[in-house]
Amino acid sequence: MMRVITNFGQSFENLEIKEGVKVKDLLLDLGKLIHYEIVHNDEIDSNVEVLLNGKNIDFMPKRLDEELTDKDTLEIYLTPLGGG
């Protein structure tokens, strides 16, 4: 079963996913759940870092179109905002 790890108070163990689900699909659904637009205009929000099996999704060949399997771990982190 797939794992989704976050730093915003909600992680999911043993998540069942349908065959062919893409990273983008899961991020859009999760964004609705937490009321935060993680993906907009086919880009990941600049305040969010997404790792698939420990690798930054931005450096993967298909990026948001990577297909997920039940053995994957998706990590989604809201990065701290800077300022003073």
Image (tube, rainbow, N blue to C red):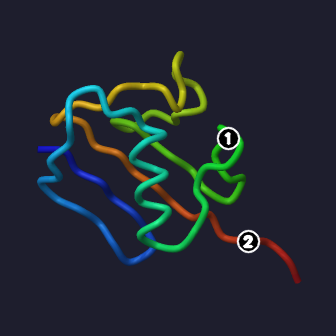
Question: Dividing the image into 4 quarters, which one contains the C terminus?
Answer: bottom right
- Image height check: is 47 above or below 57? below
Q: Position of residue 6 (x, y in %)?
A: 39, 63
The residue identified by callout 1 is 43
Q: Residue at x 67, y 53 (%)?
A: 45
Residue 26, x across and y down, in percent: 39, 47
Q: Is residue 70 left or right of residue 75?
A: left
Distance from disc 2 to disc 1, alpha carbons, whole Å, reads: 18 Å
Give the quarter of the image for residue 48. bottom right
**Residue indicated by mark 2:** 81
- Answer with the quarter of the image where residue 5 lies: bottom left
Q: Is residue 59 left or right of residue 2?
A: right
Residue shown at 17% from the left, 52% from the top: 15
Q: Is residue 1 left or right of residue 27?
A: left
Q: Amino acid at mark 1?
A: Glu
| Tag 2–tag 1 contact (CB < 8 Å) | no
Q: Secondary structure at mark 2?
A: loop
Residue in the foreground of this view, choosing between 60 and 65: 65
Judge by depth and name the residue closer to the eye, 9 or 16.
Answer: 16
Camera-nearest residue between 18 and 3: 18
Q: Quadrant of the N terminus?
A: top left
Which residue, as the protein is rendered here, is positioned at the far bottom?
84
Badge 1, how many Cα within 10 Å: few under 14, some, many 20+?
few
Mark 2 vs mark 1: in front:
1
Residue at left 28%, top 43%? Answer: 73
Instruction: Please state which amino acid type lies under the numbered disc 2.
Output: Leu
